Image (cartoon, coloured by chain):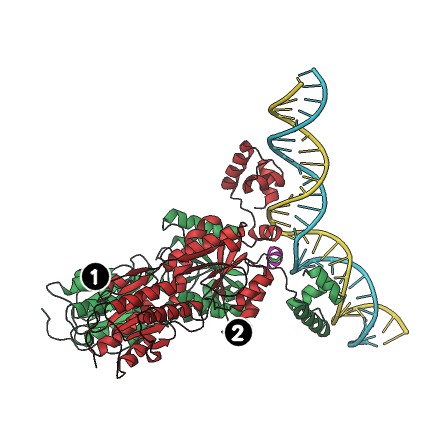
Chain colours: A green, B red, C cyan, D yellow
Amino acid sequence: MKLKEFAKQVGLSPTTVSRALSGYPEVSETTRARVAEAAVKLGYSPNVNAVRLKTGRAGAIGVVMGRAGEFHFAEFMAGMAERLVADETDILVIPMADPNHEDEMQLYRRLVESRRVDAIIVHSPKPNDERIALLHELGMPFLVHGRSAIDVPHAWLDIDNEGAIKRATSHLIDLGHRRIAMINGRPGATYALHRDSGFRKALQSHGIEPDPQLMASGNFTDELGFRFARSFLEQPNPPTAFVAGSMMTALGVYRAARSLGLQIGRDVSVIAHDDVFPYLTADNMVPSLSATRSSMRAAGSRCADLVLQLLSGRSPLEIHELWPVELILRESTGPARQSLS
Amino acid sequence: MKLKEFAKQVGLSPTTVSRALSGYPEVSETTRARVAEAAVKLGYSPNVNAVRLKTGRAGAIGVVMGRAGEFHFAEFMAGMAERLVADETDILVIPMADPNHEDEMQLYRRLVESRRVDAIIVHSPKPNDERIALLHELGMPFLVHGRSAIDVPHAWLDIDNEGAIKRATSHLIDLGHRRIAMINGRPGATYALHRDSGFRKALQSHGIEPDPQLMASGNFTDELGFRFARSFLEQPNPPTAFVAGSMMTALGVYRAARSLGLQIGRDVSVIAHDDVFPYLTADNMVPSLSATRSSMRAAGSRCADLVLQLLSGRSPLEIHELWPVELILRESTGPARQSLS
DNA sequence: TCTAAAATTGAAAACGGTTTGGCTGTTTGT
DNA sequence: ACAAACAGCCAAACCGTTTTCAATTTTAGA
């Protein structure tokens, strides 16, 4: 049913009907109520594409999905969805064809030009992220999930990765650990650098020199967790504790320790970062996993919220949120034992 | 830059330019080349919303995301994305506000009316799924990922859940297992019924009566895997083998077995269904996990493909794909031992 | 060379809404 | 009682394309 037709049924002009439904003030409450009721009864709803064309709004916010299709992604999106469901705003998932750099810039450029989205969320930014520069230059509203040091005004939300890892590491040191291994995320992203920095600071403030032999980085998979942990543990002077980048990494670390007959929480301690997944909880691991925790879903929800604020005119300069991260101690951490070798 | 302006620059009418860019045959190759080149140079690309309004196509296919934000979901979408990236088609993620039934129907109805998507993918259908009936009735193209017994013509792609579980169960029986537990997905969905049926058929064809005490169902979380497995193993007459619904469930089962001092692959066998996640692989578990395997990502990719076919006119009646499922034996399965109790 | 057919191109009418500016009555202030 | 302000409504222009229909140019056929 089209507006014209519907308006005729209600006995009003398209103008008035449109205004009534969009909540404009210059229509009487009586009329508005009548229109609203009729709309429900006759099943009229405006054609989204016509509205978008006319208003210039796309009614959607874009998220670029990397090739990996990370497990974090679904949680973040679920969070966004929770927030957006009330606002008639869609989530547009834009697949990234190639990890190729040139193409990625081109993708963002096309996305902006095509006007399919009102705003974009940028994930895992780098300290000097060209996507941010580009979006700023193109005048497309965007919010960065994570942080960038780039000298361009932009809204962002991030968790305190440095603080979290620093605290986790310090706690391990307090427990007497001196040989602490770190399994980080893919190098390049700011969050990985922040974690690295938190790790180093904690060590150094206790007079411990970070050992490059105990530091590795890569995708958050159980496999890499296992491989790295295993190779570390087989070194002549193995670590007595691990800081792991994700739940999946932690699974791998657990496995590696077990495969060498080491008991977690006694022979070797583990702290991982937990993004809070409904299907895999740190509390349920055996032994339960000490973790730095921050809900990915909550972040998604809040990011959506902030993007909406951005779109309704709030300045990006005002939108900077740094979330603290909980450290939750469970059974996987314990006092350092005597050297294992 | 708008079409009109761009056309003037090129020295042609909007009509011709539009045709040239959309690949219509009635424009000379020379002209087309000239237009294409100019478009790149001047950075012209049509306003998506105008195109959509005019053509009536939304250029997006919709996926309704349940409240859970399952980990399977991201993989499926990544697969879709892989396929769609070349086709200028977007993925629209529609959040489901409430698990409330009435609302869900309303959600689909509104989605169709709003014309935001050209087609919809329906997940985890029930045998008599009202969403299917509704979409058919509303004339919205859709593809079902999974199967439904509903008497309405529809396109679908599914994996052979029944066959997979039947084979897995039969294999356990062949290994001498008689007390086999089954941890299924949420009841209601067809896939869960199919798995249940495969399980029962395998048992019955070997003259074994399924024991309701050894059958449970629920979300695919490590926690439920643990709880169910643990409670089964603590029964007076515990199972010697498990069929688990997902990788997460399997993690829980492993944990339960370990917590009772049982060795997997020797004291108790486990087969799970593996949707193939890059971050958690059956091969890497300890002991490596025997699994029925079918790539969720491949399914997503193929579903996207089929939807595109649907949109280009292929009849839903022709689109029925049943994928076989591999059974991959690894270390988590072994001959049944004498009674454990 | 002339005409019919084919190949190109354009003008203008949609697509389905929103919004500007104007047009009626009704109140309000004095 | 009269002008001014205001509330409530409408006609028509417009958003930026695609597409129908008609006009023009080229090519082919005789």
Q: Which residue is mark 2?
A: B101
Residue A231 percent location from the top left of the image: 17, 61
Q: Which residue is mark 1?
A: A227
Q: Quadrant of the C terminus of chain A?
A: bottom left
Q: Residue B52 lies in magenta, yes or no?
A: no
Residue A108 percent location from the top left of the image: 45, 52
Q: Amino acid at mark 2?
A: His
Question: Which residues lie in the magenta part?
Answer: A47-53
Tell me the subunit letter for badge 1: A
Extreme residue toward the left, this view: A341
Q: Residue A50 lies in magenta, yes or no?
A: yes
Tell me the subunit letter for badge 2: B
Residue B296 percent location from the top left of the image: 38, 60
Local crowd size for mark 1, using a 10 Å CA cut-off: few (<14), some (14–19), many (≥20)? some
Secondary element under disc 1, as helix, strand or loop, is helix
Q: Nearer the viewer, residue B37 or B211?
A: B211
Quadrant housing residue B264: bottom left
Cα separation, mark 1 vs mark 2, equals 46 Å
Residue A317 percent location from the top left of the image: 46, 63
Q: Residue at x 54, y 31 (%)?
A: B30
Q: Residue at x 32, y 71 (%)?
A: B203
Q: Amino acid at mark 1?
A: Arg
Main SS, magenta region, reads helix
Let me know if residue A210 appears in the view: no
Mark 1 and mark 2, same subunit? no
